[in-house]
Image (tube, grey):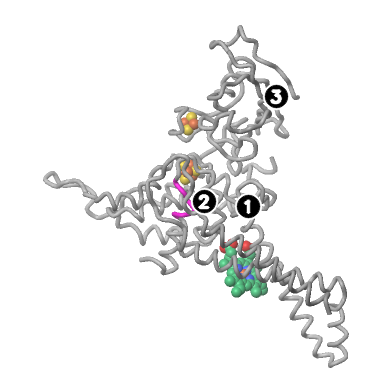
């Protein structure tokens, strides 16, 4: 069903000055009635700054409005637009065509996530795992009395967890993880990194509760420190670091 | 599209080409672990030939004196050395040693856990395994 089309200049809303174009291959698949996914091919002009998401939206606008793609912020903040771009999980809005150094760009739905349709995947399991590790400050006196101040932290205490608080729940890490590739029950790097984010927060008192939650057969021990999660994270969260530091508590290397 | 969950499966798990030397080390560690386990079982069987007395023992040992036997043992040496050296690296990493310190990341967000210390560990494991294999080959074929 490969179909090659190109955008006629007069059809576009913005004048295209670029003479450069790439072939964009988009995976089309509807689990409800398709046997397997098919690629549709489009020739898309691009500039140095054109992102993969913009190219997909251009195709949606001019050729096939039915392409399912999830996005919102277009600035690597909402975590909606993760997909496989030339075989690796990336944010479509944060990946420029020019930096891929390829004349053909293939976009597919993110691996290790069930497909809703085309490029859109289900996030339920990611959010469930995230929720499972209790992603909030736990302490007995969490409700402030009227005459009290907020819980103070020194800049040094903030440094301990702020990196992990950058997570936008995009799921790229879970998509790159080799354990996620074969184990449906694994809690995953996203949730484990968030467990560390709260354990490392000086205001939090929920360390033991969280360590108990992740200390199970499909929990933290399934991590082999392959590091792929950290290599694909678009926000510098470095889940692999958080997971090993977290495991340090369970192994008695840290307290 | 093998299943509803759209997992990459064993082929994705074992693909060493996408995520750097760390993913290569991950694969080699798994393969060498399983290889050593297989060798361990075979080794128990091999040494159990002592129950057949001196003749049985010598007969079986001849298997390792062939070209194929030498090559097989060379692979075992390589797996042993890589698995041990990389195993020490992985154990340290698992304990949170050498994985970097949390901080405020800056674009392009090079992950601190994928640092030169661990890369040196991986390359050392590969180089030492290769050196041990060459030494083994020299001893076995040089007699
Ligand atoms: C001093 C020697 C050894 C050290 C330091 C070592 C260390 C390790 C470590 C740290 C792991 C976990 C790696 C990970 O988390 O991915 C591992 C896995 C493994 N090891 Fe060893 N090991 C040693 C010897 C052996 C021996 C002699 C055997 C076989 C009889 C063996 C068989 C395995 C197996 C089957 C695995 C699991 C592989 C997997 O599925 O990922 N190891 N080893
Ligand atoms: S840790 Fe990074 S890759 Fe994983 S969900 Fe959070 S932002 Fe995305
Ligand atoms: S559209 Fe929000 S992260 Fe890409």
- Camera-nearest residue between B122 and B135: B135
Main secondary structure of the magenta stretch: helix
- Disc 3: which residue: A41
Mark 2 near mark 3, Cβ–Cβ under 8 Å?
no
Q: For residue A188, which numbered disc appears in the image?
A: 2
Asked if B73 appears above or below B62 in the picture, the reply is above
Task: Say whether residue A241 is magenta.
Answer: yes
Q: Quadrant of the N terminus of chain A?
A: top right
Q: Nearer the viewer, mark 2 or mark 3?
A: 3
Task: Say whether residue A134 is magenta.
Answer: no
- Disc 1: which residue: A182
C-alpha separation, residue under disc 1 versus residue under disc 3? 30 Å
Q: Which quarter is ligand 1 in? A: bottom right
Query: Which comes sooner in the sequence, label 1 or label 2?
Result: 1
C-alpha separation, residue under disc 2 versus residue under disc 3? 33 Å
Asked if A117 appears above or below B14 in the picture, the reply is above
- Camera-nearest residue between B143 and B102: B143
Q: Magenta segment, which residues?
A: A237-242
């Amino acid at each position: 069903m490969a179909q090659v089309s190109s955008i006629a200049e007069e059809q576009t809303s913005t004048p295209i000055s670029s003479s450069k174009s790439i072939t964009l291959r988009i995976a089309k698949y509807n689990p409800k009635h398709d046997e397997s996914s098919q690629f549709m091919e489009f020739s898309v002009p691009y500039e140095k700054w054109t992102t993969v998401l913009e190219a997909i939206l251009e195709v949606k606008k001019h050729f096939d409005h039915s392409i399912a793609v999830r996005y919102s912020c277009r600035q690597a903040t909402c975590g909606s637009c993760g997909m496989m771009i030339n075989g690796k999980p990336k944010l479509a809005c944060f990946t420029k065509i020019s930096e891929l150094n390829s004349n053909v760009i293939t976009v597919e739905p993110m691996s290790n996530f069930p497909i809703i349709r085309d490029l859109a995947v289900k996030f339920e399991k990611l959010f469930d795992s995230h929720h499972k590790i209790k992603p909030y400050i736990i302490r007995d006196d969490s409700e402030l009395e009227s005459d009290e101040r907020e819980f103070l932290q020194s800049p040094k205490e903030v440094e301990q967890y702020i990196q992990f608080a950058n997570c936008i729940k995009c799921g790229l890490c879970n998509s790159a993880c080799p354990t996620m590739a074969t184990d449906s029950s694994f809690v995953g790097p996203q949730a484990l990194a968030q467990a560390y984010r709260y354990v490392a927060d000086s205001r939090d008192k929920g360390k033991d509760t969280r360590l108990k939650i992740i200390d199970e057969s499909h929990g933290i021990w399934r991590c082999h420190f392959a590091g792929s999660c950290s290599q694909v994270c678009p926000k510098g969260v470095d889940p692999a670091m958080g997971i090993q530091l977290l495991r340090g508590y369970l192994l008695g290397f840290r307290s | 599209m093998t299943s509803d969950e759209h997992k990459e499966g064993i082929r994705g798990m074992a693909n060493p080409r996408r995520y750097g030397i760390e993913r290569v080390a991950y694969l080699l560690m798994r393969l060498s672990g399983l290889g050593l386990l297989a060798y361990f079982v075979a080794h128990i069987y091999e040494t159990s030939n002592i129950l057949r007395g001196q003749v049985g023992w010598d007969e079986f040992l001849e298997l390792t004196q062939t070209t194929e036997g030498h090559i097989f043992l060379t692979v075992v040496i390589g797996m042993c050395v890589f698995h041990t050296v990389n195993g020490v690296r992985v154990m340290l990493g698992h304990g949170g040693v050498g994985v970097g310190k949390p901080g405020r990341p800056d674009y392009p967000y090079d992950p601190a856990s994928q640092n030169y210390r661990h890369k040196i560990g991986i390359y050392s494991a590969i180089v030492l395994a290769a050196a041990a294999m060459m030494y083994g080959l020299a001893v076995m074929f040089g007699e």
